Amino acid sequence: MNKTGFPDWKAPDWQGMSEQYWRGVGDLSKQMMAGKMAQQTPWNEGIEQWSRMFQPKDANSTYEQLMEQSKAYLGQMESMFKHAAQGGPVDVRKLFGASADQWQQQQPWLSGLGDYAKWFKPETFAPMMNAMHGDPKALLQLPTLGLAREQLERAQALAANVMAYQREMSRYNALMSKSLEAAVRLMEDKLTERSEPGREITSAKALYDLWIDALEESYAEVALSDEFQAAYGDLVDAQMRVRGGVQSMVEKLTADLGMPTRTEIDSVHRKQAEMRRQLRASAAADVSGLSAEIAELRAELARLKSELKASVKITSAAPAEVTKPAANKASAPTRKVLAEPVASAPVLAAKMPPPIAMKSGAMKSGATPSGAKKTSIKKTDKAVTKGA
Amino acid sequence: MTPFRIDPQAALSEAMRFNEKLSAGLKSFQSVGNYEYGCTEKEEIWRDGKIVLYRFKGEGKPSTRTPLLISYALVNRPYMVDLQADRSIVRNLLGMGHEVYLIDWGYPDRSDRFTNLDDYINGYLRDAVRAVSERHGKRAINLLGICQGGAFSLCYTSIYPETIKNLITMVTPVDFHTPDNMLSHWTRAMDVDLFIDTLGNVPADLMNYCYLTLKPYRLNHQKYVGLVDMLDSPEELTNFLRMEKWIFDSPDQAGEAFRQFIKDFYQGNKLMKGGLTIGDKAVDLKLIKQPVLNIYAEQDHLVPPSASIPLKQVIGSEDYSVLSFKGGHIGIYVSGRAQREVPPAISRWLKERD
C-alpha cells in the first residue's frame, strides 16, 4: 500500500491478481474459441447468456444496444486495467482499443442518416456504378436517343445523383473523423488534468464517462459549425435526390403495370385535404352569418322594445290614442315576426363558436349599418358568450 | 504521473458486479412482461378523424373553475404527461383540483400528407378549445402548450386571444436562431421542399435518428451502459423500458405541416421576427395579453433555454412568470424533481388567476 491508502500498481497483490485475471481471460477466450464456454466463466458470461437468450436480430432493439455497449464497455475496462498496471503515459487510442477510424466504423449512426438510409447507402449503388466502365461522368453526359431515351435519361440522372451523394457522404464522414480526432486530443487533456493528485480516476465507469464527455464535446463543436451545417444540408439534399430518382423509376414501372402510383394517390389526398378546408371554411361562414343575423335581430328587437315602451308611455299619458288601430297594427305583426328567432337565439348561440365567428363576420365586414347597431352587437356578443 | 488511482480489488469487483448485473438482467427482463403506460383513466370528449380530445377523470371534484387543455407536440406521443402513476403531471394536476383535457394528435398516415399548420391550429386546436369551452360554459379556458405544442399554443392564442384565459408554455421554442440550438442549426441549410416532396410524410424513424444524433454518444452508448446498473431491479427496468417505448413510439409527421414548421419556425424564425401566418390568419404575439407562465428546462438539448427565454420580449402580456427547471427536456415531465416542482407551480399559478 502507498501513502494514499490505495495499493501501488507495482505491488505484488495487484500483480498477482492481475496475472490471475488475465490468465482467466485467456482461458476463457480459448474455451470460447473452442465453443466450450463453461457456465461459471467469470467474464463475458452475462453477455453470452444474453446473446443466447435473445439472439437479437433488430439492430434498434434495447437488447442489441445493451449487448453492444456492454461489450464495448468491458473492452474499455480491460484496456484501462492494462494501462493502469503498466503505468506511464496514457495512449488514448490504445486505451479505447481503436483508432479514430475504427471507432467511426463501429458507429453506424455516424454514417449520415443512419440505418434509416440503409437502402440508400452509396454502396447499394456500387453495382450500377461499376457497370459504367471507363469515365462515368462522360457516360452520364452522353445524349440519349430512341424509344428508351426517357428511361435512359432518368437512369443517367440517378447515376449522377448517386455520385453526388457519395461525395457528400465522404464530406460528412470527414467531419466525423475530425470530431473523433478532436475527441482523442481532448481526452488526452482531460487525462492530464486528472493526473493531479486528488483528481485521479478511480473506476472504469469514471473513465468511460470522461471519454463520453470528450466525444460529446468534440462532436458538438463540429456539429455546431457552419461547415457542418452546409455539409449536413448538402448530404440530406443529395440523399433526397437519389430517393427521388429511385421513386420516379419505380413509379414508371408501377404505372406500366397498371398500378396506382404515388403521384396519383397524392393527388387524391391533396384534393381531400382541400375539400376538408373548404368545408371548414363554409361551416365557419355559416355560423358567422347566423351570428350576424342573430345580432341584427336582437338589435332590432331592442329597438322595437324601446319604441313600444315609448308608445306605452304615450298611450298612458293620452288614453284616447290607445284605441288608435294604427299603433296596434304596427306593433303586432312585428312581434310575430320576431317571436321565433328571439326564442331560438340562445339555442343557436350555444352552438356557435364563441366570439371568433362574430368578429370575423358582420363587424369586420362592415355589414353593420350604423354605429348604434354596432353598440348593440357588442352587447349581444357578450350575452351570447355568457350563454355559451 | 498517472491519471489512474485504482484499487485492484475494487476494479475487479466493479467488473464482476457489472457482469453479475447483466446476468441478473435476464431474470428481470423475463419478469417485466407487458408494462402499462398512460395511467390515468380518461374519456373521449370529441374526435375528428385521428385527432381526439380526452378528459382525464380525477378522483375528487375539481376545485378550480377554469379547465386546462394540454396541447402536446406532434413529434411524440402525449402520454408522456401521464406516463405512470408516480410520474404524471396530469395525475398531479387532477389531485390539485384541476380539470384536465388533452389533445391526442394521433398517428398521421399518407392520407394526412397534406394536413398543414392551418388545419392543426385553426382547425383541430380551435375545435378542441371550443369543445372544452362549450362543455364548461366558459368563454375562455387555460391552455398548456408543450414543446412544438407550445409554439402552436402561442400562434393560437395570438389569433384567438378571447378564448384563452391563461397560457402556459413548457419547453417551448420561441427564438429558433440561438447559437446553441443544434437542431435548428442543422435544418437551416437543408432544402425542405425537396425533403417533403421526396418523402411525403417524414418517417418517425428518421425523426428519432435525428434526435439521437444530437447527443449520439450519450444516447446510443452511455444510456445502455447505464441500463446495466438497473438490471437487478425489475421496477427500475420497467421504468426504463416504458421510457424507451415512449421515445421510439413516434408518429410520422404530416408532410405539409412539417414543411411549414421548418420553413417558418426553424428557418424563418418568424415567431421572433414576425411575418408568420397560419392559413389566412396573421400571428402577432403582441396580442397575447393574458397571463403567461413560461417553463423551460436548464439542460434541455432539444429546446435550449436560450430558445424559450425570449418569449417575454415578444408577447404583449404584462403578467409574465417564468419557471426554470433543473433538468432536461424529458426529465421535466417524468423525473422525481419534476413531480415535486412542476405541477405544484402550475397549479399555484393557475389558482391565483382562476
Image (cartoon, rainbow, N blue to C red):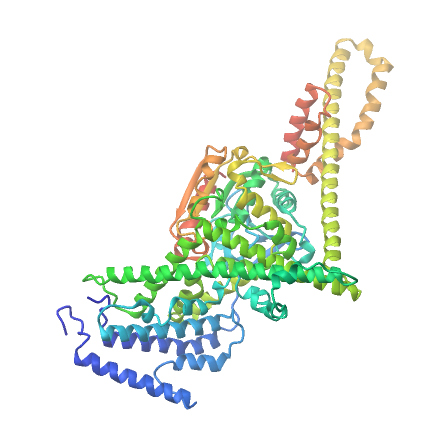
Q: Residue at x 26, y 85 (%)?
A: A20
Q: Residue at x 45, y 37 (%)?
A: B312
The percent coordinates of residue B29 (x first, y second) are: 47, 75
Taking the image as shown, residue A371 lies to the left or right of residue A2, namely right
Q: Quadrant of the N terminus of chain A?
A: bottom left
Vertical side of A226 occupied by A66: above or below: below
- Towards the viewer: A106 or B96: A106
Q: Quadrant of the C terminus of chain A?
A: top right
Seen from this angle, which residue lies furthest left? A3
- Towards the viewer: B267 or A241: A241
Where residue A334 sits, quadrant-wise, is top right
Taking the image as shown, residue B313 lies to the left or right of residue A295, namely left
Vertical side of A369 occupied by A45: above or below: below
- Towards the viewer: B109 or B287: B109
The percent coordinates of residue A61 (x first, y second) are: 51, 70
- Towards the viewer: A37 or A261: A261
The percent coordinates of residue B281 (x first, y second) are: 63, 37
The percent coordinates of residue A305 (x first, y second) are: 74, 21
Taking the image as shown, residue A119 lies to the left or right of residue A85, namely right
Where residue A320 sits, quadrant-wise, is top right
Vertical side of B25 occupied by A350: above or below: above
Please indicate, yes or no, whether residue B69 appears anywhere in the rendered image.
yes
Please indicate, yes or no, whether residue A213 appears anywhere in the rendered image.
no
